[in-house]
């Protein structure tokens, strides 16, 4: 029996320190510390997640704002693109129209120049060299591929204006003419496109251009005196006044 008692007591004695180590206060403290540590870690994780979520939300809102801005920019650029395409189409149309007008302009200018040639041929033969030389210069420029359409138009308009100005001009210039087969150096007076008169430098002889016969004819008497006075008025050697001039005969 003693042996059995000893055998029973020994395990109890060895178990006492283990029971003593499991103090309820310490157990509660350990559990509390562990709980607080877990709560603290959880709270830190929640705080971190809240901060991250706030940052993500802010980034998402900023991204949304950026997307809205980019959508507006895209819409604006599309409008600009549409406007540029429309402007490009209009420029293309104008360019084609300009090319068509340029081609027709050159044809029109050639027609005008041809009519000017015909006008000079039918007109009184005053300043004939000057006028034909001017038209020859204009014709050369019309055939120059390097000349712009604007320059060609300008030259033709200048020629037209000069020819038009002759209609109201009164001018004396010197030239050589032929009268009845005789070559003379004379003062020539053209009165617009109404009459062309000639007078020798010594004023002893004078006459008019006869459109009907297309030649110069001599005048005498009062007609010659009228030509002298008209030339003197045109050259400012006589006061300007009313003067009757013969217009030439319509027949031969």
Image (cartoon, grey):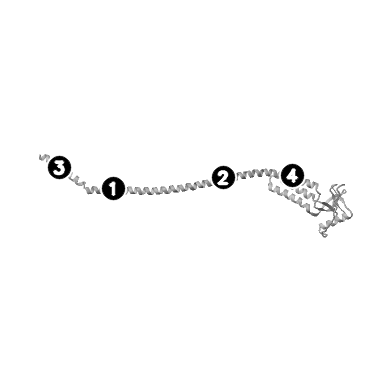
Q: Are marks 2 and 4 in contact (CB under 8 Å)?
A: no
User: Does label 2 or label 4 sit earlier along the sequence?
Assistant: 2
Left or right of residue 86: residue 42: left
Q: Which residue is mark 2?
A: 82
Bin the neighbour count of mark 3 within 10 Å (Cα to Cα): few under 14, some 14-19, many 20 and up: few
Bin the neighbour count of mark 4 within 10 Å (Cα to Cα): few under 14, some 14-19, many 20 and up: few
User: Real-space Cα distance between discs 1 and 4?
Assistant: 110 Å
Q: Are marks 1 and 4 in contact (CB under 8 Å)?
A: no
What secondary structure is marked by label 3? helix
Quadrant the N terminus occupies = top left
User: Real-space Cα distance between discs 1 and 2?
Assistant: 68 Å
Q: Which residue is mark 1?
A: 35
Give the camera-side residue of 60 and 158: 60
Q: Are marks 3 and 1 in contact (CB under 8 Å)?
A: no
Bin the neighbour count of mark 1 within 10 Å (Cα to Cα): few under 14, some 14-19, many 20 and up: few
Q: Which residue is mark 3?
A: 10
Q: Quadrant of residue 12?
A: top left
User: Real-space Cα distance between discs 2 and 4?
Assistant: 43 Å
What secondary structure is marked by label 4? helix
Q: Is residue 97 among the parts visible in the rendering?
A: yes
User: Real-space Cα distance between discs 3 and 1?
Assistant: 38 Å
Residue drawn at point x = 24 percent, y = 48 percent: 28
Circle number at residue 111: 4
């Amino acid at each position: 029996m003693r042996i059995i008692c000893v055998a029973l007591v020994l395990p109890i004695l060895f178990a006492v320190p283990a029971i003593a180590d499991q103090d309820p206060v310490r157990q509660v403290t350990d559990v509390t510390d562990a709980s607080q540590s877990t709560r603290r870690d959880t709270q830190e994780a929640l705080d971190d997640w809240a901060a991250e979520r706030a940052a993500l939300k802010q980034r998402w809102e900023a991204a949304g704002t950026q997307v809205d801005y980019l959508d507006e920019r895209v819409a604006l650029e599309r409008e600009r693109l549409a406007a540029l395409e429309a402007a490009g189409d209009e420029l293309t149309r104008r360019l084609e129209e300009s090319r068509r007008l340029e081609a027709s302009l050159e044809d029109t200018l050639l027609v005008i120049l041809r009519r000017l040639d015909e006008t000079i041929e039918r007109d009184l033969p005053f300043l004939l060299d000057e006028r034909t030389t001017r038209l020859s210069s204009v014709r050369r420029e019309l055939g120059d591929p390097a000349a712009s359409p604007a320059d060609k138009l300008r030259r033709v308009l200048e020629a037209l204006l000069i020819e038009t100005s002759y209609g109201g001009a009164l001018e004396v210039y010197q030239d050589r003419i032929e009268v009845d087969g005789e070559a003379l150096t004379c003062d020539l007076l053209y009165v617009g496109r109404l009459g062309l008169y000639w007078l020798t430098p010594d004023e002893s002889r004078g006459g008019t251009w006869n459109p009907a016969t297309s030649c110069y004819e001599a005048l005498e008497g009062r007609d010659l005196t009228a030509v002298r006075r008209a030339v003197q008025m045109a050259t400012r050697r006589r006061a300007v006044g009313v003067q009757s001039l013969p217009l030439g005969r319509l027949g031969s």
